[in-house]
Image (cartoon, helix red, strand yellow):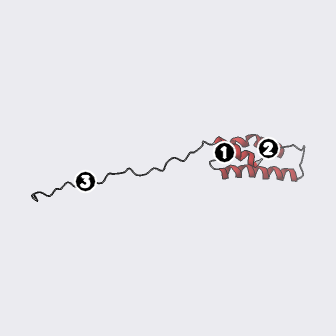
Amino acid sequence: MPTGLALRKEREELPARVARQPTEELARAVVEAHVARVDRYYRQPVDGPWIAVGMPDVEEMVAEWRLSRPVVVPGPAVSEPVVPPRRRRWLRRGAA
């Protein structure tokens, strides 16, 4: 498969690959790696027909990744249950 077609196919699959990444850093790395491959393709002489691939916008792809993640709202800190102080069970008898 010509390099241009392979890159175009990779570009079509890029949103799904980015969505599977667990962290923003990994999602950004996947997009930046693709951009580097496309840039290298654009800069080198091409054997056969030249195919326009298109450069994805890294920030836009990362923003889409953030929107696909569930919003985590920090709740109140979970503390240990409060245990009431133990009552003393002894009484002084005979001191009347």
Q: According to the image, label 2 marks what residue? A: 6
The disc label shown at residue 9, or none: none
Q: According to the image, label 1 marks what residue? A: 66
Residue 54 relative to residue 96: left or right: right
Q: Tag 2: residue type? A: Ala
Q: Nearer the viewer, mark 1 or mark 2?
A: 1
Element under label 3? loop
Q: Position of residue 32 (x, y in %)?
A: 75, 52
Give me the C-alpha separation between circle 1 and circle 2.
Answer: 27 Å
Report the quarter where the N terminus lies.
top right
Q: Quadrant of residue 72?
A: top right
Residue 57 relative to residue 89: left or right: right
Front residue of this view, candidates 86 and 64 = 86
Give me the C-alpha separation between circle 3 and circle 2.
Answer: 76 Å
Give me the C-alpha separation between circle 1 and circle 3.
Answer: 53 Å
Front residue of this view, candidates 76 and 68 = 76
Q: Nearer the viewer, mark 3 or mark 2?
A: 3
Element under label 2? helix
* Dot 2 alpha-carbon crowd within 10 angstroms: few under 14, some 14 to 19, many 20 or more: few
Q: Tag 3: residue type? A: Arg
Report the quarter where the C terminus lies.
bottom left
Residue 93 relative to residue 22: left or right: left
Q: Position of residue 85 (x, y in %)?
A: 30, 54
Q: Position of residue 43 (x, y in %)?
A: 87, 53
Q: Is residue 21 visible?
A: yes
Q: According to the image, label 3 marks what residue? A: 87
Q: Tag 1: residue type? A: Arg
Residue 77 relative to residue 65: left or right: left
